Amino acid sequence: MRMFCVLTVLVAANLLNNWLAPGAYVPTCVAAAAALLLIARWDGLTRADLGLDTVAMYQGLRWSAVLVGAVLAVFLVGLALPVTREAFEDERAAGLTVGELLWRVLVRVPVGTVLLEEIAFRGVLWAMVRRRRGTAWATAVSSVLFGLWHVLPSRGLSRANAAAGVLGTGPAGTALSVAAAVVATTVAGAGLCELRRRSGSLLAPAALHWALNGFGYVMAWAVPRWRGEGDVL
């Protein structure tokens, strides 16, 4: 019953964010994360089970500093090299103003995307399945559902991202890009689950998640300006 409630919250949040009420993205994510934490409490999970106790937070801070720095270094190298720069080209970020970019990086990504997805997939869901079936099952279930979570948001990927556009922009290309996104995020989810297990903290995968998404926006915004295109404001 409690697992069904978790899945219901996730389906509802996914539909609201990507179809019914995309303008209420951040409030929807915050409300869904709060609902999932209430379900976790109902299920008897502790802060330690979720990787949110005091010890876990201190451990997570140490991991976070290294992870964020490593992502930034890799992204800067990727932006500087012509052969990898195209991977950052994304029209959804390229046309943002400075204010819109800061909103994405400092509010929408951490308070919306990262908060909900980490609490849901590496926090509540992972802990619930782990207690019932063990770590391997928890990682497998969480990762597959994390991949499926990205079906709706990846529908326009082939049109917006230059690297994904090689698959084509028609129906077949869209289907291929969605399938590729699901596979990629399933693999990424498994990596984030392993980071959660090794660090003992939910903060570590959350920091890596924010760095990848947040710096990704910054790099996509910076590409046309690096080339002297686009308005800096």
Image (cartoon, grey):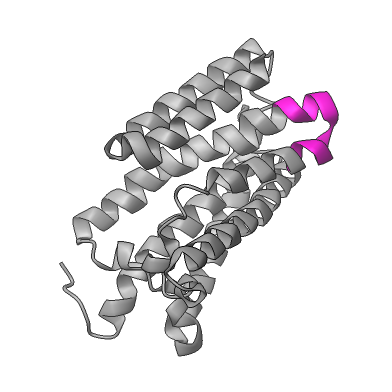
Residue at position x 64%, y 38% in the image: 122
Where is residue 124 shown, x and y percent of the image?
A: 63, 28
Quadrant where the C terminus sits is: bottom left
* Residue 204 in sight: no
What residue is shown at x 46% (from left), y 36% (from top)? 14
Which residue is more in the foreground, 158 or 233? 158
Task: Quarter of the image for the N terminus: give it.
Answer: top right
Asked if 21 appears above or below 76 in the picture, the reply is: above
Up-down: is 219 above or below 31?
below
Residue 54, above or below 100: above
Left-right relation of 219 to 40: left
Residue 41 in the image: x percent, y percent? 61, 14
The residue located at (65%, 38%) in the rendering is 201
Range of magenta residues: 128-139
> Residue most toward the bottom?
82
- 60 relative to 21 in the view: left or right: right
Residue 139, position in %: x, y? 74, 42
